[in-house]
Amino acid sequence: MLRGSNAIYGGGATGGIVSITTRPAGGQPQADTTVSFGTPLTRLRADGLNGSVQQHFAGSEGIVDYAFDVGVRHTGNSYDAKGQRIAPEPSQGDMFQSNAYNIGGKLGLRFAPDQRVQLAVSHYDASQDTKFASDPSVAKLPAGSVPARDIGGLQLDDQNRIRNTLVNLEYEHRDLLGSMLSAQFYYRDYFARFTPFDARAVSTRGGNVDQAMQNSEVFGSRLTIKTPLTSDQRTRLVWGMDFEQERSDMPIDIFDPAAYDASGGRVFTKTGTLTYMPPITTRSLGGFGQLQHKFNERWSAEGGLRYQYARASFNDFVPLSQSRLAAPATVKGGSVDYSALLGNIGIAYRPVKQHEFYVAFSQGFNLPDIGLQVRNARAGFNIGSSDLQPVKTNNYEMGWRGAFDNTLASLALFYTTSDLGDVQSFNNGLILTRTAERIYGAEAAVDYLSDNEQWGAGGTFTWMRGRETPQGGSSQQMSGYRIPPLKLTGYVQYRPVPAWNNRLQATFFAGHDYRLNGVNSFGRRDVSSYTTLDFISSYKLGKKDTVTVGIQNLLNRYYYPLYSQLLRNSNNTSHLPAAGITLTATYQHRW
C-alpha cells in the first residue's frame, strides 16, 4: 500500500485518501443497542447532560442482505474547568443544546454468484434550540485578555441546523470478461444554517446583522474497472471515469440592527432575505488509469495518470455590497473552465517479512473556490475576466513500516509543493495568487502489546512546517490554521482480566509563534502549549454486554485549544476555553 494521492480519485484528493468503512450488510442476523450518557463534572446541571440511543440491525436471507440503523442524540451545554458555561462560537458556530436523529439502511441483492447490487440511504438532522448567545461586549477588551462569555435571553427563531441526505446505488460484477467492474451512482442533499453575525463592519456584506445558510445538491457517478494484465495477477490496471455535478447557493437572513444593539446581542428580528452567494453549478468529468505491478515478493510498484475537466457557472445576481443602494448594480453571470493532467508513481520494497520501505511521488489538485469570492463581488465583477486553473500540488514521501515481535511501528517523511495560492479578486475578475508553498514534516507511530496481551503502550509523533512566498515578496511561515504545532500522543493500557481493559492516554500540543515580525493577524498569534489526559475503561459482561466509561480532561486542566488561541474573529468572542473534566458512560447489548 502506498500513501498519498493517486490517479483514481478526483478533485480534493490533494494529499491523500481517507477511507471510511461503514458497517456492512449481510451475515448472520444480528442486532445491537447502544445507550450513552455524558455530563460535565465541574458543574452538575441538567443543561449539561448529553445522551444518545442507537439501534443497529443486520443480516441476510437467501440472496438478500440488509442493514438498518436508527438513533437519536441530545447534546447539552459544555462547561470549562472552572465550572463556567462555554459561550457559543459566533464565527463557525456550535451545536450546544441540540437534538439530532439519524436513520439509514442498506439493501443488497446478489442475483448471481459474481454480481451484486446495493442501495444505501441515510438521513441526518441536527437542530439547535438554545437560550444563550455570545456576549459581543468582550470584543471591546484587548484580544486574548478574557474568555468569551455567554448571555441568556437569546431570541432567534431559526437556530443552527445541519441536515444531510445521501442516496448511493452500487453495482458490482466480479468477473466481466476477466475484469472486476464497479459502478456507482450517488446523490447528496445538504443544508446548513450558521450562527448570526454582526457584519456591519464588512462592506462586501452590505453592513448587515445577518445569518447565512448553505444549500448544496450533488449527484454523480463513477465507473471503475480492475483488469488483470497477466495470468498470475501480478500486473493489474485500474481504470475508469467519473462525473459529478454540484449546485450550491447561500441565502442570507437580515435582522434589525437596532433591536440587536438594544438587546445587547440577544434579539434577532428578521427583516428580509437576500442573496449572499448565487446558485453556482460545477460540473466535473475525469478519466483515470492506475497500473499496479508486483515484481516478486519483495518489490512492487504502481503509477497512473488522471485527466480532469471542470466548469463552474452562475446567473446574474445582486451582491450584498449593492443591497442597500437605491439603484443596485447587477453582477453578470458567466462561466469559467479549467482542466488538469496529473500523475503519480511509487515503489515499495520488503527486504524481510513484516518490514516495508516505500517512496512515492503524487500530484493532487483542488478546484478553485470561486464561491468564496463571488459572494463578496462588487459592482462590475465579470467572471469572464478571470484566469483560473486547478490548484495542483506535488507530494513527495518516503517511509517505513514494520513489526518487531510484539511492536508495530511506522515512520514517514513528506514534502509538498504548490505554486498557486487562494483565489483573489483582480480587475473585477478572479485570479489565483502566485504564492509558492512548501510544506514538509514527519510523522511516526509505535504500538506495543505484551505476549499475554495484558499490557500495551504506544504513541504518535507529528511535526510539520510550512513556508509561503508571495510573488515579489519574501518567504514567510504559514499561519496556524494551515500548519499546526508539534503534536505528541501516548497511551498505556492494562487488562487485569480478559474482560476488563483500561487505557490512559495523553495528548501534547507544543507552543509556537505564528506572528510575522511580532504582529498579530488572522491565524498568526503566539500560541501556548498544553497537555490533556483522558481515561477509558471497558468491561465485557458475558458475550453480549459491554460497559464503557470514559473521562476526558482527567486532571481538569483549564486551557485554550489552538483554535481558540488563534482567535478566528480576531477578538475575544472566539477566545473559548476547552471543556473541563467530562464523564461519558456507554452500555451496549448484542441481541
Image (cartoon, helix red, strand yellow):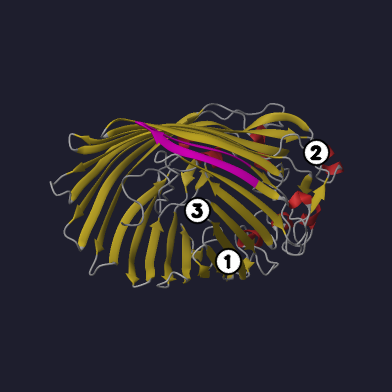
Q: Residue at coordinates 22% horizontally, 58% vertically from top-left?
A: 300
Q: Earlier in the sequence, mark 3 or mark 2?
A: 2
Nearest the viewer among 439 and 129 is 129
All told, the count of numbered labels is 3
Q: Which residue is mark 1?
A: 514
Q: Nearer the viewer, mark 3 or mark 2?
A: 3
* Label 3 secondary element: loop
Q: Nearer the viewer, mark 2 or mark 1?
A: 2
What's the magenta bit mostly, secondary-structure-wise?
A: strand
Q: Amino acid at mark 2?
A: Gln
Q: Which residues are magenta?
A: 52-72
Q: Earlier in the sequence, mark 3 or mark 1?
A: 1
Q: Amino acid at mark 1?
A: Tyr
290 above or below 82? Answer: above
Residue 481 falls in image quadrant: bottom right
Q: Residue at coordinates 13% horizontally, 47% vertically from top-left?
A: 230
| Residue 578 colored in magenta in the image | no
Q: Position of residue 291 (x, y in %)?
A: 22, 48
Neighbour tally class for label 2: few under 14, some 14-19, many 20 plus, Cα within 10 Å? some
Nearest the viewer among 398 and 136 is 398
Neighbour tally class for label 1: few under 14, some 14-19, many 20 plus, Cα within 10 Å? many
Q: Position of residue 214 (x, y in %)?
A: 59, 36
